[in-house]
Amino acid sequence: MASAAIQSAKSVIINEISEAIKDAGSIVVVDYRGLTVEQDTILRKRLREENVNYKVYKNTFITSAIKGTEFEQLGVYLEGPTAIAIAKDDATAPARILAKFAKEASKLEIKGGVVEGSLYDAAGIAKVATIPSRDELISKLLGSLQSPITNFARCMNQLAEKGGAGAVEAPVAEAPAAEAPVEEAPAAEEAPAEA
């Protein structure tokens, strides 16, 4: 009876992990040993603010949950204490946040991760961490798209201040239109008046 309850509890955790990684863009695996409670709390808050799911699981549970998925390749990093950071919205967010935090808390060790189907070691995750966030990329794109429009508007404004487009363009002389002779309709013959 006790083993059935344990097996049931294990399957609940494995299903929880499976549900968390479903439609995920990335998973980064870390060794969290040596972090203080305060550091762990700060890290979890930063990850939560970026919609990154961060949790500590047993390696056997993670291995069972990722079996048959694109994240199965993470198995090489599932040794020792393991926490995983899972992102669905911004695939680079876990790498960015964890790499930045690892500079503040040297005990946090990034083992590796899978980002959009590709496996990366710790050095690869550090490179992924340099990619700007999705919002930053969209902002830069909009800025570069807006720049030509802004310059065009500025030029048009300067033209208007100088007297409009007529100040720049020479007027085009129009040729007189050829007039076609107009035929007069024959006058209706009047009937002689009867006396």
Image: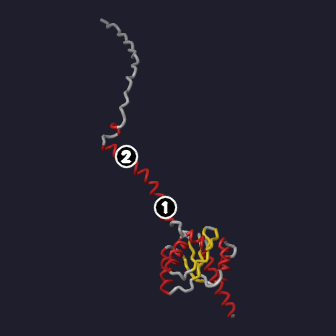
Image position of 155 with respect to 20: above or below: above
Residue at disc 1, secondary structure:
helix
Residue at horizontal 58 percent and vertical 71 percent from the top: 125
Residue at horizontal 61 percent and vertical 67 percent from the top: 116
Identity of the amino acid at label 1? Ile
Sequence-earlier tag: 1 or 2: 1
Tell me: 166 left or right of 143: left
The answer to whether residue 122 shows anywhere in this view is yes
Q: Residue furthest top?
A: 195
Q: CA distance from mark 1 to mark 2?
A: 26 Å
Image position of 90 with respect to 18: above or below: above
Q: Quadrant of residue 194?
A: top left
Q: Percent from the top left, x then y, of residue 193?
A: 31, 8
Q: Residue furthest bottom?
A: 2
Q: Percent from the top left, x then y, of residue 147?
A: 43, 53
Q: Which residue is mark 1?
A: 138
| Front in this rendered view, residue 182 or 76 | 76
Residue at horizontal 61 percent and vertical 77 percent from the top: 111
Identity of the amino acid at label 2? Cys
Badge number at residue 101: none
Instruction: Report the colour scheme.
Output: secondary structure
Residue at horizontal 57 percent and vertical 81 percent from the top: 55
The quadrant the C terminus occupies is top left
Q: Percent from the top left, x then y, of residue 127?
A: 57, 69
The local crowd at label 2, few if under 14, some if 14 to 19, many if 20 or more residues have their Cα within 10 Å, is few
Q: Quadrant of residue 94?
A: bottom right
The answer to whether residue 89 shows anywhere in this view is no
How many badges with numbers are in the image?
Answer: 2
| Front in this rendered view, residue 158 or 54 | 158
Q: Which residue is mark 2?
A: 155
The local crowd at label 1, few if under 14, some if 14 to 19, many if 20 or more residues have their Cα within 10 Å, is few
Residue at disc 2, secondary structure:
helix
